[in-house]
Amino acid sequence: MCDTMGGVFGKYAIFGKNSDRDTAEPQVVEWYPRRNDNPETVKCTYIEIEQVKRTHGILISRPVWLWGAEMGLNDCGVVIGNEALFTNHNSTAEALTGMDLLRLALERSASAKEALDTIIQLLERYGQGGNCGYKSEMYYDNAFLIMDRNEIYVLETCGKNWTFKKQNRASISNCISIEDDGDGYSSEVINFKRTYTDEETTKLFGGDRRFQCTQNCIKDACSVSDFFAALRTHADGFELSSRDGSGESVCMHGGEKTGSQTTSSMVVELADEITVWLTGGALPCISLYKPLILAGDFAEKHCEYEALTDQSFWTKHNAFINGVKEKSLSDDYYRDRDSLEEKWRLEVAEKKMECADTDFFEACVKEEEKFMEKWA
């Protein structure tokens, strides 16, 4: 389960996504540099496909056992998030996963429109499929929110069938949203939602409820803090007890009602500089969004692979989350959280960067460690 949203606001744009996965599944944030000398093929999660010679530098959030990514951006400012869609044509055959398609599009595309076209071409050639569950089997089709500074495309798929819609503000959850109002279709114009939705499974996982929630959030959201608040939304109120799991919450807590949990969250601000805000771990309502500033030609400043948050980072963060989520957290906890994030936002605004600043990100991580020590 997941929720993704984005908005284009004149001279800047903002993207946000909660990645909802198995509660015990680590997710890492990694930088892969631009390459001009790729081999002829690339091994994705399940299948090997033809590779392009040149690929863009990408920053991705990736479940550790998969090749593909839940969300990410590239050095051209293209950002993508994907969602599981439960359709009446889900295939168990191994092909490209939705996360593979996301990563491949980031590697190969210089704009949102090019990323849209890339996913469609790969989908039609190789198809989509394969188990995407960590502890148990899960098969699904995919939706994608694809954006850059100028435009957003929502792409929804069923097998090799697809439709897309261009928007200025958009959100996607685990439900098909495009009916017969799309801007393009794989064949004739149809009511895509009515034709391909598996209504029982979609309802079971709360996709429609969360879609309505994110649609309401995106109407007025226009700042990073608005996106933080949207991704921290719960079904029964903003400060829902963290003990209460619900498949209808944007900030999803694992529990008796759902085996999924928000295991990582990302907000990307596309302005003169790109700032990526990362929890690097579970439950954004409890976690802190830490800023990574990407400025100038940051692809040239990172010439080697780099893990910004590795599996040990996620595990440590998760241990803290597991320790505090059973508590009734006081208002002071949330005031401390908000105060630290506001401090970082002011520091980001004051910085005039000429290149990427991983040192600042690491300094924020150290401040987060002190925060966790205080509240553990």
Image: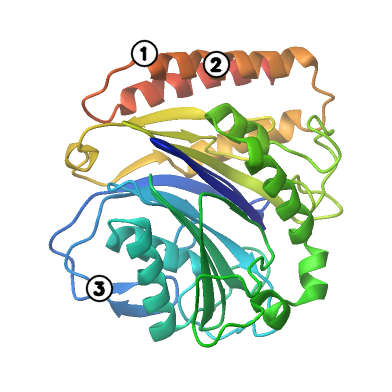
Q: Which residue is mark 2?
A: 342
Of the residues under marks 2 and 3, which one precedes in the sequence?
3
87, above or below 85, in the image: below
The percent coordinates of residue 64 (x first, y second) are 49, 55
Q: Which residue is mark 3?
A: 51
Of the residues under marks 1 and 3, which one precedes in the sequence?
3
| Relative to 102, 5 lies left or right | right
Q: CA distance from mark 1 to mark 2?
A: 12 Å
**Mark 1–mark 3 contact, CB under 8 Å?**
no
Residues 218 and 344: in front is: 218
Q: Which residue is mark 1?
A: 350
Q: Is residue 63 visible?
A: no
Near mark 3 (Cα within 10 A), the count class, few <14, some 14-19 or many ≥20, is: some
**Mark 2–mark 3 contact, CB under 8 Å?**
no
Q: CA distance from mark 1 to mark 3?
A: 41 Å
The percent coordinates of residue 162 (x first, y second) are 53, 77
